[in-house]
Amino acid sequence: MAIQENQLHIVEQQINHTAQRNALLRSVFLIGLGLSAWWEIYSRLAGFADWFTYSLLRLSPITRLGTTVQFMIYETPKVLMLLVLVVFGVGIVRSYFTPQHTRAILAGKRESVGNVLASLLGVVTPFCSCSAVPLFIGFVTTGVPLGVTFSFLIAAPMINEVALVLLFGLFGWRVAAIYAGTGLLIAMIAGWIIGRLKMERYVESWVYETPAGSGLDEDTQLGWAERIRSGREAVRDIVGKVWPYVIAGIAVGAGIHGYVPQNFMAHIMGKGAWWSVPLAVLIGIPMYSNAAGIIPVVQALLQKGAALGTVLAFMMSVIGLSFPETIILRKVLRPQLIAVFVGVVAVGILIVGYLFNILM
């Protein structure tokens, strides 16, 4: 009887393994088919936008309205398609870097090493403004130093995968690498400075009384089928939330592209205007957007003569110093620490803006 039960168990395992393998093969086939269709459509977007604007709508390419409409028709599907592809891929990658894994890696690390690791992990770890508080509590209560925690909180929204891949797709690897490198540097140094200031007393006392690990689910081992499912869910969740910001950003960018005279922004956001970088940071801090929504605006500003350093400072202040995130962090931080956090990061962004306006 025991032998029969053991054989039955082996057969069930073989059936489950075969079913999982078939599901994976089916998913890989569908992904390959989808990528082929994605590339076929993506490669024809420019021609379609020209045909739609100048042939179907009969708008002239030398008019402001014509260039505005062409920009909107071309950039909207282009950015959304890039976003879907990137979020799907990173959704799979992120299944390997859960908040639990991140917390375990950072716990007990020396602060300088922790600042570097936290900044790098911030790029691939799931993060949004609403998760800032539970992540902060989870890090602090498991022994992650305060400065290291801030390195993560700075890097995660600022240097996210959407920003990097959209920058690469729209401007090339050079601009994307500059943005990633300077963003990581700001996160590392700002976290290190906050750690040196010993401001633990400005964390709300109830945070340290929270049992370690509360509010976080235990990690589970995932197979490839589940990881692919994570990618699909990430697309549904993230793209479903940010697409209105994408379209709004592209609409603003289209207006700048079509109606702002060439090189007009050089007078306001160019290298010669010394006040352009602090002004860009002051304008960007209270704004609420995400990478997908702000990058089309950045693209239009650069095309109209804005300096790269000024535009990078504007983008970093919008994404890295999100006003809603600072409001949410007030639940766990006192105003003094929030002010230091905003001040240190803002100074880092100013230095980056001026540096690149001088060098490039």
Image: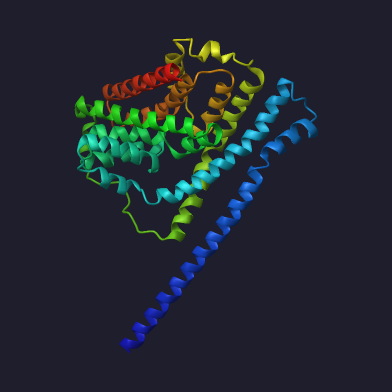
Please indicate whether residue 343 sits to the left or right of residue 40 in the image: left
When asked about the image quadrant of residue 65, the answer is top right
Q: Against 12, is 82 above or below?
A: above
Q: Position of residue 27 (x, y in %)?
A: 53, 60
Snapshot colouring: rainbow
Please indicate whether residue 146 sits to the left or right of residue 27 in the image: left
Q: Position of residue 308 (x, y in %)?
A: 49, 22
Residue at image location 43% in from the left, 20% down from the top: 356
Front in this rendered view, residue 222 or 178:
178
Q: Position of residue 182 (x, y in %)?
A: 38, 28
Is residue 262 visible from the viewing direction of this image?
Answer: yes
Q: Position of residue 44 (x, y in %)?
A: 68, 42
Residue at image location 52% in from the left, 39% down from the top: 241
Please indicate whether residue 49 sits to the left or right of residue 315 in the image: right
Residue at image location 34% in from the left, 39% down from the top: 120
When asked about the image quadrant of residue 13, the answer is bottom left
Front in this rendered view, residue 163 or 9:
163
On-image quarter of the N terminus = bottom left
Please indicate whether residue 21 sits to the left or right of residue 102 in the image: right
Is residue 290 visible from the viewing direction of this image?
Answer: no
Q: Against 105, is 23 above or below?
A: below
Q: How many marks?
A: 0
Extreme-bottom residue of the structure: 1
Extreme-front residue of the structure: 359
Front in this rendered view, residue 64 or 354:
354
When asked about the image quadrant of residue 255, the answer is top right
